[in-house]
Amino acid sequence: MKIPKIKHGLIIFMLICMLAGLMGCAGSAQPFDESASFEDLVSQAKGTTVTFYGWGGDDLRNKWLDTTVASILKEKYDISLKRVPMDIDQILTKLAGEIQAGKQEGSIDLIWINGENFFSAKENGFLYGPFTNKLPNFSKYIDETAPENQYDFGYPIEGYEAPYGKAQMVMINDSAVTPEMPKNTDELLAYVKKYPGKVTYPALPDFTGSAFVRCIICDIIGYEKFSTMPADKEAIRQIIQPAIDYLKELNPYLWNQGKTFPATKAQVDNMFADKELIMTMSYEPYEVANNIAKGIYPDTARAFQFDKGTVGNTNYIAIALNSPNKAGALVVINEILSAEIQLSQYENLKTLPVIDYNKLSVDQKKRFDAVNIGQGTIPQEELLSKRIPEIPANLIPIIEEIWLEEVPGK
């Protein structure tokens, strides 16, 4: 599961943020009793509606939220969940505009968010928090010390968002067409040479294409150097140059000889499904199973990853600073962190759960262990054992710029 990143919308959002700061219009949120017990929050939230703004492009997730999650919330807490499908750049522009207008009670309660979008929203003071210390299920099921619960693409979370689902990059090919599953960049180079014109990846700044390039960088260079690196373009260029040179070495053997790249992951997927390509990729590790089930991929499709690992991230839920229903928002997030809903998400959406397996009861562990993750997938334990932290969000646009300058058509 991924969240599309801001590109054009980020500039608009930042301009609105600066304008709001200059005008002194950033109104405070609805008066809220910070000392209220969770039981008091549940009572206060009864009979209310919570709006959940997020990307609406996943029909399966939309149905799950509108039926399974909404039904549980209504039955247990008499809370109505109103899902509002909207791209993240539009959500943050709307949020900034409402705060700029001085609205202490806006229209947004929950936001599905991560990465540079979270960085921008938190830096500009448009999120409510910290709040995770108010959630019983956060302490009950979440490993608070895990890196993904402390940092979001390298940026400190500090309780301003709660985990929702995990994602991790995998590559996918068809065992009936090619027996090889490259385990590192050297084997990938040999692979594309053996099957010239049959491999490519989405052009950056496509989300998946960018993640694939970061996997290449991490396999060749490692990821440790990036954790404290300043956002200096020439310094970054110098560090990643071996990986850029490698990507240029791939070009002559790629689809269209690397002169151009498909614009989106969807195009690469379609080319793979049509057998024009022998490989595709996804930041959703169990997407291969879903696409086999839908008849999009053949039964012989399978996911694989590099031995050194692939980048993974967590997506989160944040609360708007001027949320009109903070009590309801907190109750909803707490329920999403429950073992019940995390199991349902794992079973129905094939999304990696965010809860700490070691904190589950024996019965809960059995239920999670019994989930059929589908054909062609990598078992969760193996997948997570090769999980590389994401490069900090403020460095990613710079890496994408360097790729655009140096790789296509080279």
Image (tube, rainbow, N blue to C red):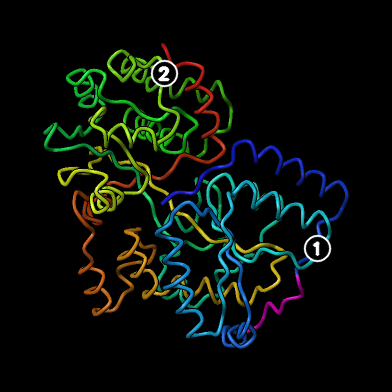
Which residues fall within the magenta stretch?
A: 30-36
Q: Residue at x 11, y 36 (%)?
A: 176
x, y (%) of residue 14?
A: 71, 42
- Relative to 120, does residue 8 appear above or below in the rendering? above
- Relative to 127, does residue 124 appear above or below in the rendering? above
In the foreground, 282 or 245: 282
Q: Is residue 137 left or right of residue 273?
A: right
In the foreground, 342 or 228: 342
Residue type at mark 1 is Lys
- Relative to 16, does residue 128 appear above or below in the rendering? below
Numbered badge on residue 260: 2
Q: Is residue 246 left or right of residue 394?
A: left
x, y (%) of residue 21?
A: 82, 49
**Label 1 secondary element:** loop
Magenta segment includes 309: no
x, y (%) of residue 118?
A: 59, 51
Q: Residue at x 34, y 30 (%)?
A: 216
Q: Disc 1 to disc 2, how far (Cα)?
A: 47 Å
Q: Is residue 326 left or right of residue 213?
A: right
Report the residue marked by disc 1.
Answer: 103
Q: Quadrant of residue 130?
A: bottom right
Query: Mainly helix, strand or loop, the magenta region?
Result: loop
